[in-house]
């Protein structure tokens, strides 16, 4: 039973999240040969001031 966690910046619509969850689930079923009902996906959304890349907060990037 795979549990996939996605961390991304806030701002996606619920429809975008639905599509992401569907496509990742389909990939796990096809490539990892797991049951669709066994795939768990958690989407964590973070604010720009809570996410850094290369030592720089995303809030500080232009």
Image: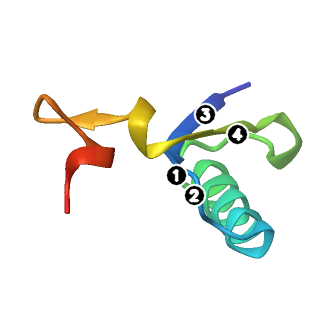
| Eye-nearest disc, 1 or 3 | 3
Q: Nearer the viewer, residue 3 or 46?
A: 46
Residue at (59% x, 32% y) in the render: 5
**Disc on the earlier residue, 2 or 4:** 2
Q: Nearer the viewer, residue 60 or 41?
A: 60
**Disc on the earlier residue, 3 or 4:** 3
Q: CA distance from mark 1 to mark 2?
A: 6 Å
Q: CA distance from mark 3 to mark 4?
A: 13 Å
Q: CA distance from mark 2 to mark 4?
A: 10 Å
| Eye-nearest disc, 3 or 2 | 3
Q: Nearer the viewer, residue 45 or 41?
A: 45
Local SS, label 3: strand
Quarter of the image containing the C terminus? bottom left
Q: Which mark is residue 34?
A: 4
Quadrant hosting residue 14: bottom right
> Can you give x and y, in whole percent of width and height, for residue 22 in the image?
73, 63
Q: CA distance from mark 1 to mark 3?
A: 14 Å
Q: Which mark is residue 27?
A: 2
Give the labeled residue for mark 3: 4
Q: CA distance from mark 3 to mark 2?
A: 12 Å
Q: Is residue 11 above or below residue 41?
A: below
Q: Is residue 1 above or below residue 44?
A: above
Tell me, yes or no, whether the two marked residues, 1 and 2, touch with CB atoms within 8 Å.
Answer: yes
**Disc on the earlier residue, 1 or 3:** 3
> Can you give x and y, in whole percent of width and height, for residue 10 in the image?
58, 53
Tell me, yes or no, whether the two marked residues, 4 and 1, touch with CB atoms within 8 Å.
Answer: no
Asked whether, in this view, residue 6 is left or right of residue 3, the answer is: left
| Eye-nearest disc, 2 or 4 | 2
């Amino acid at each position: 039973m795979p549990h996939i966690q996605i961390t991304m910046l806030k701002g996606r619509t619920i429809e975008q999240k639905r599509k992401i969850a569907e496509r990742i689930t389909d990939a796990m079923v096809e490539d990892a040969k797991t049951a669709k009902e066994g795939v768990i996906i958690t989407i964590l959304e973070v604010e720009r001031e809570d996410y850094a890349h290369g030592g720089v907060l995303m809030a500080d990037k232009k």
